[in-house]
Image (cartoon, rainbow, N blue to C red):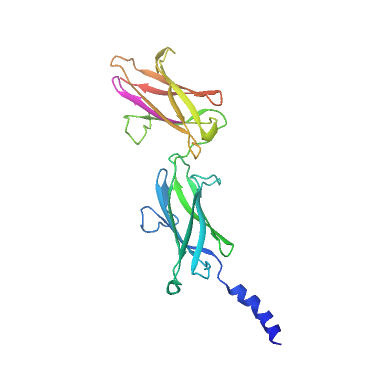
Amino acid sequence: MRFILLVAVLPAMLAAAPALEIVRPIVAQSDGGAPTPASYEHVAGETLFFTCRVAGYSKSPEEKIHLAYSVQAFDPKGVPIVELYQNELVTEVAPQDKEWMPKIETEVQIPPLVASGAYKIVVKAEDVLAKTTAELAVPFQVRGHDVEPSETPVVRNFRFFRGEDDAQPLDKPIYRPGDGVWAKFDITGFKYGPNNRVDVSYVTSVIAPSGKVLWTQPEPAAEQSESFYPKRYVAASFGISLQGNIRPGEYTIAVAVKDALGNQTGEIKQTFTVAQ
């Protein structure tokens, strides 16, 4: 009878054993800072400070624990935005510290050219002694710069500005003789090489109302770089100064784009007005 009772109780005892668990996740804007709300929009290029705790771990007869863990952040499409962070923790936990929980902490650098959307930090932990694992996805929001994708090289979000450092584009690109003309735009649709290498260049030209080319950029502006997270676009800009005797009329800015890795080209034309 006693044997039967033990057999019946044993499954309940095993089920009651604590499971490995990742708890108390915090995403903050500073080291040791307050948690940001789940709805808070972080910005491209920002550094996040992430921490969490591990509960339900086991101990050896020598009162030691052995945990292995990893942290990695992903974009809305499941593409990792940072390299995998891995580490282990082997330490002694005294009986009086039975409520203590190991802490995982690391920084997550949001790439500068990410899109807006729902991102996540995935934490994985393993109790090496008990052979148990746990995983937790911690969501966070990002407000980025949205650029419509393309299969071929194109210029997106072309904007005219009054000055180089202006944040607000002109509603109507109207200038006067002697003014500076500034434009900013995004280049996308290029191919990637090894290590997400990009090799993109562009040349701008100014065309008169008659169709005559008044000015062409002497040397192409180029972006040649590699990155862990693939660049969604190349941010580009240029500026010219209008001559004081330029005739009023509608002028054209032509941007010729070249993708060296994809052996592709693209072009866009935008107009601005020179008023008296």
**Residue 183 falls within the magenta-colored stretch:** yes
Is residue 22 depicted above or below 190 in this figure?
below
Q: Position of residue 265 (x, y in %)?
A: 53, 23
Relative to the observer, which residue lies in front, 20 or 153?
Answer: 20
Q: Is residue 175 magenta?
A: yes
Q: From what the image shows, is residue 246 above or below residue 162?
A: above
* Residue numbers of the magenta segment: 173-186
Q: Position of residue 98 (x, y in %)?
A: 46, 72
| Residue nearer the viewer, 64 or 154 | 64
Q: Residue furthest bottom?
A: 1
Residue at image location 57% in from the left, 60% down from the top = 133
Residue 254 rendering spot, x and y as whole percentages? 45, 21
The residue drawn where x is 35% and y is 27% is 182
Can you see residue 119?
no
* Percent of width and height locating residue 223: 44, 28
Q: Residue at x 49, y 47 (%)?
A: 117
Quadrant for the N terminus in the image: bottom right
Q: How many marks?
A: 0
Instruction: Say above or below: 92 vs 190.
Output: below
**Does residue 196 appear in this view?**
yes
Q: Main secondary structure of the magenta part?
A: strand
Decide: is 182 above or below 64: above
Residue in the picture at 52% in, 57% down: 68
Q: Nearer the viewer, residue 117 or 194?
A: 194
Q: Which quadrant of the rendered structure holds the C terminus?
A: top left
